[in-house]
Image: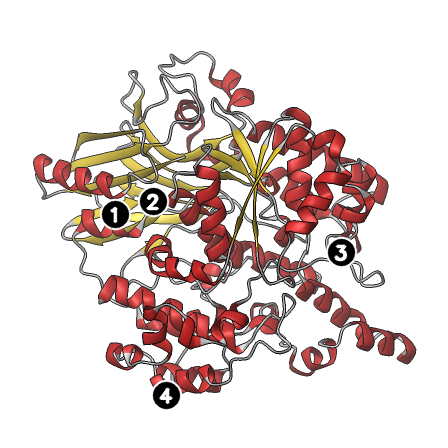
Amino acid sequence: MCGIYGIVSASLSKGKILRRLEKMGGLLRHRGPDDKKENIFQVNRGWLGFGFVRLSILDLETGMQPITCPKDGSTIICNGQIYNYVELKPEVSGEYFISKGDIEVALHLYRKKGIDFLQELNGMYAGAIFDQPGNKLILFRDRFGIKPLYYTEADDCFAFSSEIKTLVAGSRLPVELNHAGLAAFFTYRYLPGEQTMFKNIKKLPPGSYLEFDLNSGAYTIKRYWEYKLDMDVPEISFADAKEKFYTLLSDAINIRLRSDVEVGALVSGGIDSSAVASLAADRKPDISLFTIAFKEERYNELLRVKKFLKANNSRFSSARLYTELCSRQALDRLPEIVRSLEEPISLGTILPTDQVCRLASDRLKVVLTGEGADEIFGGYRKFLIEAAACQYHTLSSSRQKELDSTFPELKPYLAVRHKDPARRYIQSEILYSNDELKKLIGRDDADNSFPGDALPRLSGSEHPLNAAIAFEIRARLPDYVILRLDKLSMRHSLEARTPFLDYRLAEFAATLPVGFKVNIDECREKFICSHAYADFSLLDHETAFRKKQPFTIPLADWFSKPDILPDFLQDIMLGNVIKQQGILNQEIAREHMSKITACGIGPQTLVSEADRIFSIIIFTLWYDEFFG
């Protein structure tokens, strides 16, 4: 896990590029505190500079980058890990290696197979290759966008980096607000697609590569991987599906335990992080586990974690559990968290995520997590509602009444259920309605539709539940869920590995019948996961089949008493900061603030006034940080 950065320019001198690279590297040291290096290459139209900061995890002695092939001068830098490098290395066994790790294997695979090398990589990565024989620069990103990669054109240069602040420093780009992104942010809580909230700064999309012609200065972007859910597959029994799920998950964890330093695990009350910890503990009995607790019992999952460990004591008898309390005082860290996220993300769990990453980083460099299972196997309640909605009008009146009772939100959803899958899948979580949105941002032409580059390529024949999963994986997973994990783990120089985002496991999930993922008769998400965890003894039966509790935090409890919040929050909620910034309508914000209550609000609440206010707070803090 590291940070990468680079500059291409036909007019800047070698010395100027080097000085910019050095500054960029200094701003990225939290991603790579162990070492730092820059290389400059002369190209037809000027210079190409590569920079790399290293968090040493694999191949501690010879794994420093950039790595250059002495045969043809091709060079690679890469942030992340190629977990299956051991299996891939025989394909390029005839090459001369100067390192013993994973990234040089990827370089030689590119030299042998061209851009098709990306089809063989299994891991999390965002990298750059200087193809000297082809006189081109290749930027590439893993299938799920686990590792970020930004780029821009400014000051007669093309620049890229793992983070935005670094990119701005290297390109000398004047920072400007992307006003067009406001509507999407206050609708979805994040900005889907390649656009960021900074004008002229873009993200390379997941599963894509950018090819930059060093002769002409032109570039193109292409997808090399698409999550397809309408493929023709042979029928599979539920028993065989469970066995294959277990086999794939086991191997995904095995290869993610490859490390020359200690690997721990983050655990919550959820079944997926618990299953990951169980499989990891089978191979590493003294594993270190990290979790966060809350004073508010409705949100506190520590008792669940302890109960799970006790029920599985034979597996975890040598494990060590580290815990911390996440309280209202965690709000004090919001400004620095927003600074590290760089993009406004209205997700309350950024607070406990930051805290548990700091807790883990005090003791080790690498952790496994359970992220990705909910997205791939339909683990959110909205997927249950979608599955019920698909069947509702074909059912008997008595069965409809049963569903109405089981899912109180089903009828209201059916009344507004959109024909467009892009709008439909997020409908249950829309933060502000169109009318509220126009008042808040003061624009009648606000466009909150999904951008084209954030859309999965659907055939139209997919089951609506699978279409929802496709959107989840293409947009919300990389730009919301995983982005917060990457930025906050790397803020503390911690590598977070996500076994459920092994592409083999995801592609297997795409072949499964919808009923294997979501079962409305039993009102259960991730149906196959629970059964596999229990049948293969990864979890005790009670843990495997307990009802899902969303991982949320007591925002409503905290915000309902604004007079005891940190001063900067009082300035936003009660003062004139919003008005002074001139972007949002302060009076509308105040209206929402006046409605905050903790009554009737709990972990299952998807949208409350506290969530709306949190989005305003996050945006206001973000704007102050980067434009104030």
Residue type at mark 1 is Thr
Of tags 4 and 1, the one toward the viewer is: 4
Cα–Cα gap, marks 2 and 1: 8 Å
Residue 514's disc number: 3
Q: Residues within 10 Å of mark 2 (few under 14, many from 20)?
A: many
Give the residue at x 28% y 41%: 28
Coordinates of residue 204 in the picture (x, y in percent): 38, 50
Give me the disc on residue 162: 2
Q: Mark 3: give few (<14), some (14-19) or many (20+) Cα within 10 Å.
A: some
Binning the other alpha carbons within 10 Å of mark 1 as few (below 14), some (14 to 19) or many (20 upward) gives many
Quick check: 521 left or right of 417? right
Say which amino acid is labelled 3: Val
Q: Quadrant of the C terminus?
A: bottom left
- Residue 301 on image: x %, y %: 64, 53
Give the CA separation, mark 4 to mark 1.
36 Å
The numbered mark at residue 481 is none
Is disc 2 in contact with disc 1, using a CB cutoff of under 8 Å?
yes
Rendering quarter of residue 68: top left
